């Protein structure tokens, strides 16, 4: 764990729970792609750079989830590096309480304000700033998060962030977090059409061909949608629907899983409602969802 792996002439990644990409610019100026889940991850990444004689210049965050931005604050404090992100992702990175608030749907309780859902705040610079390393190509990959991006280095290595869950994750959790299911499927189509010397997903093995993992992720998403449609053959309120999903997949309910899976199911329902495949009615103070006849 926390081993530096070479992916191209000047491109590397650090093997850790959420892979940290490394691109080394002329003069030994290093750019990290994400910063790990906490201060410890950031310190370990910095130690690896220092051992190679590289100076940290910037962190490019693919998205704002805590396991990808947890090292930002520490790295900025120690090196003065810039953290680059845009739009909603930038807002969440600079105001991390937005993440548990988004998942919970209101002011988040203390039980959801921990490092796995709420990183320390860092100062964000937009990628339009002249100091952004222009040789790095940003690739829109929305779905898992608002405006998640991938990064292609000049070595033709593509960091795919969290658009692909590993087979183990899909088998264990069944419903990986999605902000926008429709956008996620479009992103999978986009990645399927991409070519690169090496693809590096954050939570799966790096490889030249992501075809098999793409199919698993697409099948998992469509399977979840079909499960919801089967469950909604009869009208059902959201809490009962969420309970039925946990029962169907044998998932253990915790406060964190209630927030993560609950938010994901709401996103699926929004997609199915927009497509006219489900309806929602309001009667006697209850919102009931049902598959469209």
Image (cartoon, rainbow, N blue to C red):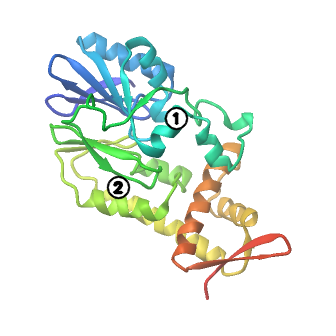
Under tag 1, what secondary structure?
A: helix
Q: Residue shown at 53%/27% (left/top)?
A: 121
* 1, 53: nearer the viewer: 53
The correct choice, above or below, for 145 with respect to 92 in the image is: below
* 192, 56: nearer the viewer: 56
Mark linked to residue 66? 1
Answer whether residue 262 is visible to the viewer in this image.
Answer: yes
Left or right of 54, for residue 18: right
- The location of residue 246, given as percent across then percent down, is 67, 59
- Which residue bears the numbered disc 2? 213
The correct choice, above or below, for 41 with respect to 106 in the image is: above
* 18, 74: nearer the viewer: 74
- The location of residue 109, given as percent across then percent down, is 74, 38
Toward the right, the furthest residue is 284
- Number of dots carrying numbers: 2
| Figure quadrant of the N terminus | top left
Mark linked to residue 130? none
Under tag 2, what secondary structure?
A: helix
Q: Of the two numbered discs 1 and 2 on the same chain, state the one appearing first in sequence.
A: 1
Left or right of 45, for residue 181: right
């Amino acid at each position: 764990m926390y081993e530096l792996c070479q992916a191209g002439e000047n491109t590397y990644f650090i093997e850790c729970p959420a892979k940290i990409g490394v691109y080394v610019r002329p003069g030994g100026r290093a750019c990290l792609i994400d910063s790990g889940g906490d201060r410890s991850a950031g310190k370990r990444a910095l130690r690896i750079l220092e051992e190679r004689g590289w100076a940290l210049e910037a962190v490019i965050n693919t998205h704002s989830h805590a396991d990808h931005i947890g090292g930002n604050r520490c790295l900025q404090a120690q090196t003065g590096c810039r953290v680059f992100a845009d739009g909603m992702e930038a807002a969440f990175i600079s105001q991390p309480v937005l993440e548990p608030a988004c998942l919970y749907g209101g002011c988040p309780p203390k039980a959801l304000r921990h490092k796995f859902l709420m990183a320390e705040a860092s100062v964000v610079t937009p990628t339009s700033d002249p100091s952004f390393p222009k040789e790095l190509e940003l690739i829109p990959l929305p779905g898992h998060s608002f405006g998640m991006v991938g990064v292609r280095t000049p070595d033709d290595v593509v960091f795919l962030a969290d658009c692909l869950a590993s087979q183990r994750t899909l088998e264990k959790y069944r419903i990986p977090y999605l902000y926008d299911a429709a956008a996620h499927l479009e992103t999978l189509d986009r990645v399927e059409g991409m070519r690169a010397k090496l693809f590096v997903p954050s939570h799966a093995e790096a490889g030249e061909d992501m075809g098999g993992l793409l199919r698993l992720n697409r099948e998992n998403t469509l399977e979840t949608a079909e499960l919801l449609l089967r469950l909604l053959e009869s009208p059902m309120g959201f809490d009962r629907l969420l309970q039925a999903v946990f029962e169907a997949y044998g998932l253990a309910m915790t406060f964190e899983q209630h927030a993560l899976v609950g938010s994901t199911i709401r996103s699926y329902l929004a997609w199915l409602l927009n497509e006219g495949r489900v309806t929602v009615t309001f009667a006697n103070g209850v919102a009931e969802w049902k598959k469209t006849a």
